Amino acid sequence: MDLTDKRLVLIGGAGLVGSHIVDQLTAEPVREIVVFDNFVRGTRENLAQALKDPRVRVVEGSMTDRDALRRVLEGADGLFLLASLWLGECVNDPRSAWEVNTLGTWNVVEACRELGVGRLVYSSSASVYGDAVVTPMTEEHPFNNRTTYGATKIANEQMMRAIYEQHKLPYIGYRYMNIYGPRMDYEGTYVSVIMKVLDRIFAGQAPVIFGDGTQTYDFIYVEDVARANILGMQAECADEFFNIGMGLGTTINELVEILLELTGANLKPEYRTQEQSFVTNRIGSTEKAEALLGFKAKTPLREGLQRVVEWRLSKEKVAK
Ligand SMILES: NC(=O)c1ccc[n+]([C@@H]2O[C@H](COP(=O)([O-])OP(=O)(O)OC[C@H]3O[C@@H](n4cnc5c(N)ncnc54)[C@H](O)[C@@H]3O)[C@@H](O)[C@H]2O)c1
């Protein structure tokens, strides 16, 4: 889709990924950028820079509210669907997980079809794969997921495929690896390992590693993820799922070492027994996204983490 003069809506656009998409969209010749968010996790502060652009508008509401959704989607050319409850929230409150992630997504899909929205870029997750059988994981990797969060993402992928079969609603879905970058949650229950390590370092305490630290993840910088979303909106392909990652594995030991170096902290990690089991060794093949979307992540981990450290330090200063 050519973005010129288009009205684009981002459901969940005030969160980590969505707010970075909004920032990048302001550099495009679009007509209007509408963020629809209920602010359970995202913030207006994430959109502060973008809201200086008169084409950016915020509508507060939930995708569980069908009427509010319809009002915001009326006349939309394209939609980025980012809203979702997270892994931990889905463990604690599975009913809300299904109501928000799946019924909410159905509300969106139904409204898109009935209102003739031209394209949908859906945020799925690499959680659909569960533990890796082979690495790097291609998009053909089996759904080994055993979590409610991943189950809602699989259900949504299947929902979109079925609707495409019936009505040809043009959509694509992204299976993100581990996204990091400025605007990540750093307070509350559901913060990432990067934030937990930085919390300890800034408090002068040894960062804690659960298990032996050899668990490997594919970390991707949020601005690369935002760019992938815009390329996805511009692309012509439909009914396809893509891994969005760097295609590189980093162990928790390596991650902690880089964070210690970047902060100049003279601390040694403390190893503790792993009580919870985590998915390990999740590295995604990047070939399909490169071939069909022309997407390749550019930001090296050290550079991205440097920006995260600077951003976190700026937050610490504001708090003092
Ligand atoms: N961050 C990651 O590492 C990662 C990895 C894999 C998949 N994902 C998926 O990518 C998407 C975006 O991730 P993110 O990191 O930006 O998440 P986020 O939590 O920062 O953003 C999601 C946004 O959706 C909003 N929201 C939640 N429920 C809503 C509802 N009912 N109606 C309207 N808005 C609602 C939240 O307030 C938040 O602003 C999510 O679907 C997530 O599951 C993220």
Image (cartoon, helix red, strand yellow):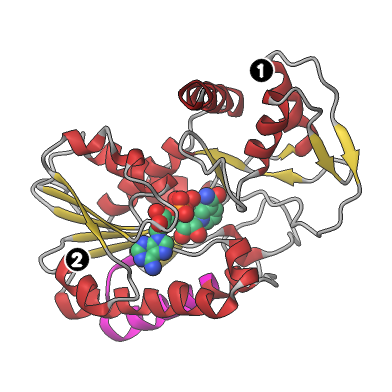
Q: Which mark is residue 103?
A: none
Q: Is residue 237 left or right of residue 157?
A: left
The residue lying at 30 percent from left, 73 percent from top is 108
For ligand 1, tell me if the residue under mark 2 lies within 8 Å: no
The residue lying at 89 percent from left, 38 percent from top is 271
Count of numbered labels shown in the rendering: 2
Foreground residue among 275 and 28:
275
The residue lying at 66 percent from left, 48 percent from top is 283
What amino acid is labelled 1 in the image? Answer: Thr
Asked whether residue 283 is in view, the answer is yes
Residue ranking furthest to the bottom: 166
Quarter assignment of residue 72? bottom left
Q: Is residue 172 left or right of residue 157?
A: left
Foreground residue among 190 and 249:
190
* Secondary-structure class at tag 1: helix
Q: Which mark is residue 263?
A: 1
What amino acid is labelled 2 in the image? Answer: Gly
How far, Cα to Cα, is label 1 from label 2?
A: 46 Å
Q: Quadrant of ligand 1?
A: bottom left
Which residue range is magenta in the image?
153-171
Please state which of the two labelled residues, at mark 1 or mark 2, is closer to the viewer.
Answer: 1
Q: Measuring from the top left, give residue 19's x and y in whole percent.
A: 35, 44
Decide: few, some or many residues near mark 1? Use Cα within 10 Å; few <14, some 14-19, many ≥20.
Answer: some
Q: Measuring from the top left, give residue 195's x and y in whole percent.
A: 63, 37
Q: Main secondary structure of the magenta part?
A: helix
Decide: few, some or many residues near mark 2? Use Cα within 10 Å; few <14, some 14-19, many ≥20.
Answer: some
Check disc 2 and report the residue beneath it: 118
Quadrant (top left, top right, bottom left, bottom right) of the N terminus: bottom left
* Secondary-structure class at tag 2: loop
Asked whether residue 176 is in view, the answer is no
Foreground residue among 193 and 157:
193
Q: Is residue 53 above or below residue 130?
A: above
